Amino acid sequence: MDNYAHFMNKDAVKDADRAHVFHSWSAQELIDPLAVAGAEGSYFWDYDGNRFLDFSSALVYTNIGYQHPKVVAAIQEQAARMCTVAPGFAVDVRSEAARLIAERTPSDLDKVFFTNGGAEAVENAVRMARLHTGRPKVLAAYRSYHGATATAINLTGDARRFGNDSATAGVVHFWGPFLYRSPFHATTEAEECERALRHLEDTVVFEGPQSVAAIVLETVGGAPGVLVPPAGYLAGVREICDRHGIVFVLDEVMVGFGRTGRWFAADHWEVTPDLLTFAKGVNSGYVPLGGVAISGAIAETFARRPYPGGLTYSGHPLACAAAVATITTMAEEGIVEQSARTGAELLGPGLRALAARHPSVGEVRGLGTFWALELVRDPGTREPLVPYAAAGAANAPMAAFADACKKGGLWPLTAGNRIHIAPPCTIAPEDVARGLEILDGALSVADAHMA
Ligand code: PMP
């Protein structure tokens, strides 16, 4: 701790941050980051003693909560044994992490390519799909987020790609299903599913199936607002991919490892992609780690032909030790099941009760510890509470809502007109109740901003 002796007060921390840290997604002089002093379980706190119940799980990744003692101990033990070793060697901790992951991914996704995070996983999944098929194009949904590196941000359909246009050739966007704001003017889930699949197949046919390497989809859309696909959609995408020889990539960076109440969100619909990307929950982000789980057929492509890609820190021992401890602890302590129960018994009913009391809540969606409230100006027209990609004054209603949460001791995650509810999968029932109570008060602020 001696290294931080001069940082014993928040002003020193904030001054050095302002002078030297360049923050992501931000105008550097227009932000005022909270100085965080510590974290444990579902809470973190600042230097003034304010404790925040974290309904954002950092950036939806502390599935096991902050500072889980078993994961902390595993990192410490690995640091004492072997902090690092080059990625080309076989090493026990990496072998074990890969085995535990492969054991849980669907079907024959039995090989793991390790990365340092989600975007790199998506980059490599796209590279594998292009090399496997020999085709150039990649299809992704408008309502999606896949990361901030060149290919991943171009695949991303949401407004964050706007400042990064067309770094990658061959990306084509399509509309996925979203009944509440149906791009297909559907009125039932079945209709939405059927029309979304027809639209996707048409997109493939008009792009030329012989040129489409991959369809990349979030199993449940995360950043775009917890978009749970209708029954039959993912199976339908699987069929389209099979019909046209296209690689099906499911991006489970945000939803893998218990977030939706199953190890992988794909398990809800029993669908198997050819490639599955993961990060975040794999070790709750204690040390950066991501990866791609690879099918037998795609692994075979690179059995006798070198894979032209790699990363210096691929399968880093400290990150893998954290993954081994996280996965075994989640299994031993029933944390995936806990996430499912919390959703079914507490968060789902609790959020629906809030929606019934607050007219600004247009829709409640989610499963496990992964939910969103869609806020509207008018429930009849479903006009969003703030316009798409609103910033500054246009975003004032959402900013006011977030402030009310923070004043109440809840750290919220908002995106566009949505409140995302993603506490650690380990959240205690009394903390769910407490969070819902704070949300109840803050939603009155949102109600006051309606038309
Ligand atoms: N894919 C999805 C579905 C994500 O939610 C994210 C991050 N939120 C990413 C990819 C990118 O991950 P990272 O920020 O670790 O690169």
Image: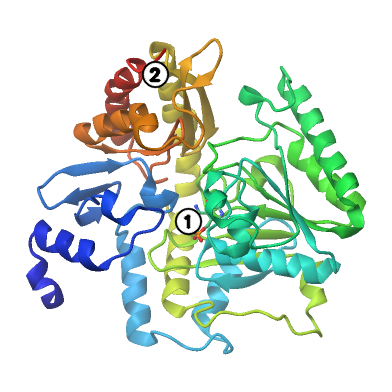
Which amino acid, by three-letter code, is at mark 1?
Gly
How many numbered discs sit on the rendered protein? 2
Provide the secondary structure element on which disc 2 rests.
Answer: helix
Which amino acid, by three-letter code, is at mark 2?
Leu
Question: Can you name the residue that lies furthest to the top here?
Answer: 380
For disc 1, the neighbor class at 10 Å (few under 14, some 14 to 19, many from 20) is many
Whole-percent x, y for residue 321 in the image: 44, 73
Image quarter hosting the N terminus: bottom left
- Residue 87 placement: quadrant: bottom right
Judge whether residue 67 can be spotted in this image: yes
Report the residue at 38% width, 32% height from top: 395
For disc 2, the neighbor class at 10 Å (few under 14, some 14 to 19, many from 20) is some
Image quarter hosting the C terminus: top left
- Residue 288 placement: quadrant: bottom left
Whole-percent x, y for residue 403 in the image: 26, 33
Using residue 186 as the reference point, say whether residue 254 is left or right of it: left
Q: Earlier in the sequence, mark 1 or mark 2?
A: 1
Residue corresponding to mark 2: 354
